């Protein structure tokens, strides 16, 4: 931030978190929380694959607990992380955790197959240091999403004019797009639009967006 | 161009501001938050530090790995003391907060979770000795944060990039500089304290046993805290660093890059490798 870097005082003296590791614990909790927000409903089941360093040192760092806690909606500084297994049981969240050596994007990586009442989504997320995360896959799409901004996710069948329509609607509310990306399976197939924005979308606008698209999620910026 | 500590110190000099005041003004300008809001956030973090110290001293903690086993609790109740008094409070606080972290307690990563015991171990006991108020301590956190920023700008705060010198070393330098300001030292003395603290730990490797923030990390928090006290006291006595503080910080970054990867948080070298070998031998012999 100031001084030419990307951080500020609040980042250096922080975050406040449950130990022991900003990447393996705090980042894991944020990853789980982001998965829950993408699902958009109370999760009933999550199948987690820990990869790379998450697989090797995850248990000692409470990575498993932190991911589950995040899926339950807990923040990285919530003491409930320590008893996330118990909280999962109380909240009807069934989970499985397995480990694999290989990873695809980053040594701190996890696959989360998260499932609610009527939806099921697979996410590949990474924890890249200091509690910062990146979502690298969502369903069949390769994306790169930090959760640091209010985020719009929209899937639709690939066709001309969708991006223009979405950006026009956002412009109506004077919402500035910080980053935007479109991925598709193939021409005319399923497509996913990912936009990180400087401010969030009103409910009214979310409804109008959803009217033309198959699936829409508006996710607030993740808290630290 | 990323700014180092010297540019910040010059600006503070020109504006005739204490270092902490300049940092507060810059943070407010950059984040759009009111200075009072920033101070409030830091005051909350101070409270988390205090609670971690209390918790770590009053309960005997065991980590999930079993490598951590109530060191702070045992130390705090020991009878035999080399120095005792505030010195022992500093050691006890560093152990307590770092153990809380290892055992999934709530801490403030400052600058990292692995080095979270150092700032509380310096600031909290010294507040009791010298009567610093909470408002003073928030200033201490602002100064410490500014020093950390300068280190991040010129070198690194990450053990994976720079070894333990970048984490516990930086925390030690941050604490030393903060303490100098709280003790009424001038800007040049802050620079010297930071330089002394970092110079003393150049080359310190990051070799966590089993890849966990436990052995030797918890006791290295003690090293960082004690080192900060000595660095601050030397600077307050008027000792000056021969090599300028920014050059020392850059050197720390260079030394970090020159370290083999095995000694940068990968647990492939150092004590991590030794422990693994000993464990294998034990298994083979049993």
Image (cartoon, coloured by chain):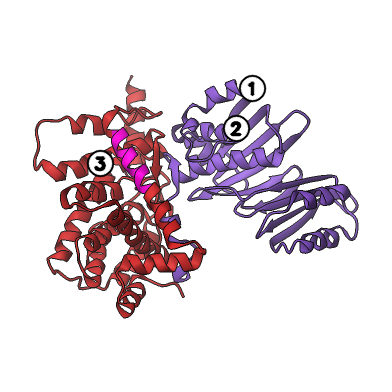
On the rendered structure, is B25 left or right of B83? Answer: right
State which chain is coloured red.
Answer: B
Q: CA distance from mark 1 to mark 2?
A: 10 Å
Name the dominant secondary structure of the magenta segment: helix
SS at circle 2: loop
Total number of numbered discs in the rendering: 3
On screen, residue B98 above or below B67? below
State which chain is coloured purple.
Answer: A
Q: Provide the chain ID for the residue under circle 3.
A: B
Res A113 quadrant in image: top right
Position of residue A43 measured from the top left corner of the image (x, y, whole percent): 68, 30
Name the residue tied to disc 3. B93
Foreground residue among A124 and B186 = B186
Position of residue A190 measured from the top left corner of the image (x, y, whole percent): 85, 47
On screen, residue A84 above or below A222? above
Q: Provide the chain ID for the residue under circle 2.
A: A
Foreground residue among A157 and A177 = A177
Farthest residue, direction bottom: B14
Numbered mark located on residue A92 in the image: 1
Foreground residue among A210 and A174 = A174
Mark 2: give few (<14), some (14-19) or many (20+) Cα within 10 Å. Answer: many
Position of residue A12 measured from the top left corner of the image (x, y, whole percent): 41, 56
The quadrant of the rendering that contains the C terminus of chain B is top left
Q: Is residue B274 visible?
A: no
Q: Are marks 1 and 2 on the same chain?
A: yes
Name the residue tied to disc 2. A72
Foreground residue among A87 and A24 = A87
Q: Are marks 3 and 1 on the same chain?
A: no
Residue B172 lies within the magenta run: no
Task: Check if mark 2's residue and mark 3's residue have beta carbons within 8 Å.
Answer: no
Region in magenta: B45-56
Position of residue A127 measured from the top left corner of the image (x, y, whole percent): 55, 46
């Amino acid at each position: 931030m100031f001084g030419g870097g990307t951080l500020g005082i609040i980042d250096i003296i922080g975050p406040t978190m449950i130990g022991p590791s900003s990447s393996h614990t705090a980042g894991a909790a944020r990853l789980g929380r982001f998965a829950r927000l993408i699902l958009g409903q109370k999760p009933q089941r999550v199948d987690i694959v820990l990869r790379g360093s998450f697989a090797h040192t995850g248990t000692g760092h409470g990575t498993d607990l932190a991911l589950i806690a995040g899926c339950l909606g807990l923040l990285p500084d919530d003491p409930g992380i320590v008893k996330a297994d118990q909280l999962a049981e109380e909240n009807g969240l069934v989970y499985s955790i397995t480990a694999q050596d290989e990873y695809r994007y980053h040594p701190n990586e996890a696959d989360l197959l998260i499932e609610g009442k009527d939806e099921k989504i697979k996410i590949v997320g990474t924890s890249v240091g200091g509690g910062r995360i990146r979502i690298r896959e969502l369903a069949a799409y390769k994306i790169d999403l930090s959760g640091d901004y209010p985020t719009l996710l929209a899937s639709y069948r690939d066709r001309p004019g969708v991006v223009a329509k979405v950006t026009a609607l956002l412009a109506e509310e004077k919402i500035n797009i910080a980053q935007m990306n479109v991925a598709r399976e193939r021409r005319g197939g399923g497509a996913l639009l990912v936009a990180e924005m400087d401010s969030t979308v009103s409910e009214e606008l979310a409804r109008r967006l959803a009217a033309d698209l198959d699936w829409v999620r508006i996710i607030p910026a993740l808290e630290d | 161009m990323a700014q180092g500590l010297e540019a910040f110190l010059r600006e503070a000099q020109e504006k005739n501001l204490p270092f902490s005041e300049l940092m507060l003004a810059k943070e407010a300008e950059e984040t759009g938050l009111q200075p009072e809001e920033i101070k409030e956030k830091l005051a909350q973090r101070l409270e988390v530090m205090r609670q971690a110290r209390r918790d770590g001293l009053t309960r005997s903690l065991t980590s999930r790995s079993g490598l951590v086993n109530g060191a702070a609790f045992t130390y705090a109740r020991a009878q035999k003391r080399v120095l005792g008094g505030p010195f022992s409070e500093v050691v006890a606080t560093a152990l307590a907060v770092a153990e809380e972290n290892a055992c999934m307690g709530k801490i403030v990563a400052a600058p990292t979770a692995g080095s979270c015991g150092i700032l509380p171990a310096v600031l909290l006991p010294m507040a009791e000795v010298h009567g610093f108020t909470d408002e003073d301590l928030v200033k201490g956190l602002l100064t410490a944060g500014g020093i950390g920023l300068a280190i991040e700008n010129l070198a690194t705060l990450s053990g994976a990039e720079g070894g333990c010198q970048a984490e516990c070393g930086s925390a030690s330098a941050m604490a030393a500089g903060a303490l100098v300001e709280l003790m009424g030292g001038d800007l040049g003395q802050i620079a010297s304290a930071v330089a002394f603290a970092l110079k003393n730990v150049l080359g310190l490797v990051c070799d966590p046993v089993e890849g966990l923030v436990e052995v030797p990390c918890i006791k290295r928090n003690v090293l960082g805290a004690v080192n900060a006290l000595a660095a601050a006291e030397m600077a307050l006595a008027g000792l000056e660093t021969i090599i300028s503080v920014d050059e020392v910080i850059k050197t720390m970054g260079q030394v970090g890059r020159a370290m083999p990867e095995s000694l940068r948080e990968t647990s492939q070298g150092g004590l991590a490798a030794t422990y693994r070998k000993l464990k294998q031998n034990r298994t083979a012999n049993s």
